[in-house]
Image (spheres, coloured by chain):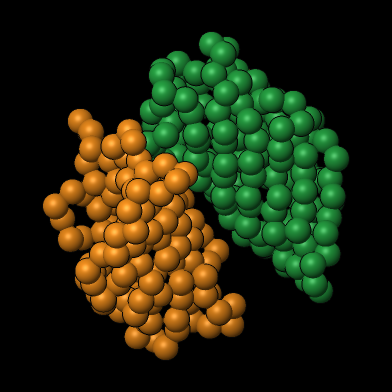
C-alpha cells in the first residue's frame, strides 16, 4: 500500500456497560424478502459509564434470522440519563456463532439534544459487544 | 474486541450536488467515478458510477455519512457496500474541509462502519463481519481504510 495515508488508525476505548431487560419477543415469521422477522421490545435496564448513568426506557431490537444462520440486528434504544438528558442509541449489527466470537456485535451512534448534557455522545461512533449467554453489553467508543 | 486490517479503498470522485433541505441542513451527493480496493484475500474495482456518498451536513460542518455503491472483485463477484459514519471537527477545520483545502486528518474525528452484501462463496465472511473505517480526502479523491472487528 502507498504511504500517503496519514489518518489515524482506529481503536476502541471502553465507554459503557449496559444490561438490557427484555419483554417477550414478537415473532412476525418468515417474510417474503427472505428470513424470519422477530422484534424484541425493551422492558428496562441500566447503562453506566463515561460519566453517565441511565436507564433504558424503551425501543428494542428488530431481528432477521437469515438463511445462512446469521441474525441481522437493527437496534434502537431510548435512554434516560440521571443528569436529565435523554438519548436514542441506534445502529446495526449481527448475532453470529464462530470460533473466535459468538454473540452480538453492533455499530452504534447516539442522538441527543445539541444543547443538553449528553450532546457529546452524538459526536462519536461506538461499537458494542455482548457475548452469547452474557447479559452484559460492553460499548466502546471508536477512537 | 480487536481490529484487524481488512482493506483499503481508493476512490476518484465525480459530480458534487448539494440539496439545501433547510437552513443549516444540507444533503450532499458525492458521486464516485471509479475506484479500487485491496486487502488480504480480496481485491477489485468499484463499479463505475454505481453510487456515492450522500452525507447530511450541518452548518457547523458536523455530518452523518451514508454511502452506497457496488464492488466487483477480481474473481468476478459483485458486492453491495453500504456505509454510515460520523464527522465532528472544530469550525476552522470544517471550513477548510468544505473548501477542499488540505487538512491534517488527525485534526478531526471521522469514522464509519461499512456493511457488505456478498454472494455465497469466498467473500461471504463480509456478510457477518462488522468493520470500522477511517477516511482521508486527497486532491485526487478519497482513501478509506477498513478494519474488521474480531
- Against A16, residue B50 (above or below) is above
Give the camera-side residue of A139 and B116.
Answer: B116
Q: Residue at x 50, y 18 (%)?
A: B42
- Against B29, residue B52 (above or below) is above
Q: Residue A117 location in percent, x, y?
A: 49, 81
**Does residue B87 appear anywhere in the picture?**
no
**Does residue A88 appear anywhere in the picture?**
yes
Q: Residue A135 location in percent, x, y?
A: 17, 61
Q: Quadrant of the N terminus of chain A?
A: top right
Q: Residue A121 location in percent, x, y?
A: 48, 68
Q: Residue at x 76, y 31 (%)?
A: B49
In this rendering, position of residue B10 left or right of residue A78: right
- Against B39, residue A42 (above or below) is below
Q: Residue at x 40, y 75 (%)?
A: A78
Q: Residue A108 location in percent, x, y?
A: 44, 57
Give the camera-side residue of B96 and A21.
Answer: A21
- Image-quadrant location for residue B148: top left
Which chain has been coloured green in this picture? B
Which chain has been coloured orange in this picture? A
Q: Residue at x 54, y 19 (%)?
A: B77
Amino acid at each position: 500500500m502507498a504511504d500517503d495515508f496519514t489518518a489515524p488508525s482506529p481503536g476502541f476505548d471502553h465507554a459503557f456497560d449496559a444490561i438490557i431487560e427484555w419483554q417477550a419477543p414478537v415473532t412476525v415469521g418468515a417474510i417474503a424478502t427472505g428470513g424470519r422477522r422477530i422484534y424484541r421490545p425493551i422492558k428496562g435496564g441500566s447503562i453506566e459509564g463515561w460519566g453517565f448513568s441511565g436507564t433504558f426506557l424503551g425501543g428494542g431490537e428488530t431481528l432477521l434470522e437469515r438463511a445462512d444462520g446469521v441474525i441481522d440486528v437493527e437496534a434502537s434504544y431510548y435512554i434516560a440519563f440521571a443528569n436529565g438528558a435523554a438519548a436514542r442509541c441506534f445502529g446495526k449489527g449481527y448475532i453470529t456463532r464462530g470460533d473466535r466470537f459468538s454473540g452480538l456485535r453492533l455499530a452504534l451512534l447516539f442522538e441527543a439534544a445539541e444543547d443538553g448534557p449528553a450532546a457529546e455522545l452524538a459526536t462519536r461512533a461506538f461499537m458494542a459487544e455482548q457475548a452469547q449467554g452474557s447479559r452484559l453489553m460492553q460499548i466502546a467508543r471508536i477512537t | 474486541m480487536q481490529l484487524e486490517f481488512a482493506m483499503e479503498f481508493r476512490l476518484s470522485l465525480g459530480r458534487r450536488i448539494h440539496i439545501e433541505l433547510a437552513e443549516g441542513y444540507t444533503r450532499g451527493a458525492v458521486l464516485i467515478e471509479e475506484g479500487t480496493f485491496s486487502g488480504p484475500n480480496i481485491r477489485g474495482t468499484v463499479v463505475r458510477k454505481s453510487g456515492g456518498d450522500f452525507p447530511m451536513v450541518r452548518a457547523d460542518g458536523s455530518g452523518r455519512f451514508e454511502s452506497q455503491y457496488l464492488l466487483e472483485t477480481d474473481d468476478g463477484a459483485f458486492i453491495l457496500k453500504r456505509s454510515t459514519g460520523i464527522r465532528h471537527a472544530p469550525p476552522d477545520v470544517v471550513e477548510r474541509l468544505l473548501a477542499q483545502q488540505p487538512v491534517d486528518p488527525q485534526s478531526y474525528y471521522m469514522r464509519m462502519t461499512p456493511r457488505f452484501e456478498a454472494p455465497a462463496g469466498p467473500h461471504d465472511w463480509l456478510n457477518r463481519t462488522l468493520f470500522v473505517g477511517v477516511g482521508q480526502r486527497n486532491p485526487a479523491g478519497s482513501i478509506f481504510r477498513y478494519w474488521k472487528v474480531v
